[in-house]
Image (cartoon, rainbow, N blue to C red):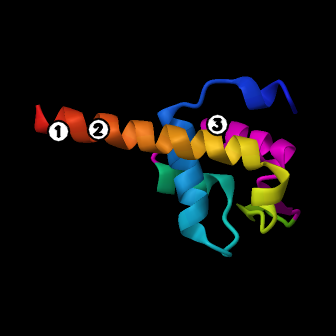
Amino acid sequence: TRDMDRHGISIQEVRFYQALVASGKSWRTSRELAIKANIAHRTARLFTKRFADLGLVEIADVFPGHRYRLATKAEKTSAAYLTRIQHAESVFSTSSTEESTT
């Protein structure tokens, strides 16, 4: 998991994280998160796996598909990654603000 913590964070990953946060304690499928984040479903599946490996999401193994939500202990298990994604979130929001004013 240490190598996965080193990859660059994309705007799609930030939107996926925001979709998880916005879902609160509700369980969501990767498809629902993809729609909410406005990203491809295959990208959401990649992020759910990555976030699960990092301990950021809880997984409900139910039929017909897994459900995910932000882990209650995410701040403890993945503090460094959360700091990075929250920093990326602020960078991307600053970039979009600057683009809309120019």
- Return the residue at label 1: 100
- Return the residue at label 2: 96
Badge 3 local density, few (<14 within 10 Å), some, or many (20+)? few
Q: Nearer the viewer, residue 16 or 99?
A: 99
Classify residue 44 as left or right of residue 51: left
Q: Nearer the viewer, residue 19 or 77?
A: 77
Q: Write the residue at 82% across / 44% down.
A: 54
Mark 1 vs 3, N-terminal side: 3
Q: Write the residue at 86% across / 29% down.
A: 2
Q: Write the residue at 85% across / 42% down.
A: 53
The Cα atoms of the two marked residues, 1 and 2, are separated by: 6 Å
**In magenta segment, residue 58:** yes
**In magenta segment, residue 66:** no
Above or below residue 60? Residue 80 is: above
Tag 1 near tag 2, CB within 8 Å: yes
- Return the residue at label 3: 42
The answer to whether residue 92 is seen in the rendering is yes
Between circles 3 and 2, the one closer to the viewer is 2
Q: Amino acid at mark 1?
A: Ser
Between circles 1 and 3, the one closer to the viewer is 1
Classify residue 11 as left or right of residue 59: left
Above or below residue 76? Residue 102 is: above
The Cα atoms of the two marked residues, 3 and 2, are separated by: 25 Å
Q: Which percent across, then down, holds residue 77?
A: 85, 53
Q: Secondary structure at mark 2?
A: helix
Seen from this angle, which residue lies furthest left? 102
Q: Amino acid at mark 2?
A: Ser
Mark 3 vs 2, N-terminal side: 3
The Cα atoms of the two marked residues, 1 and 3, are separated by: 30 Å
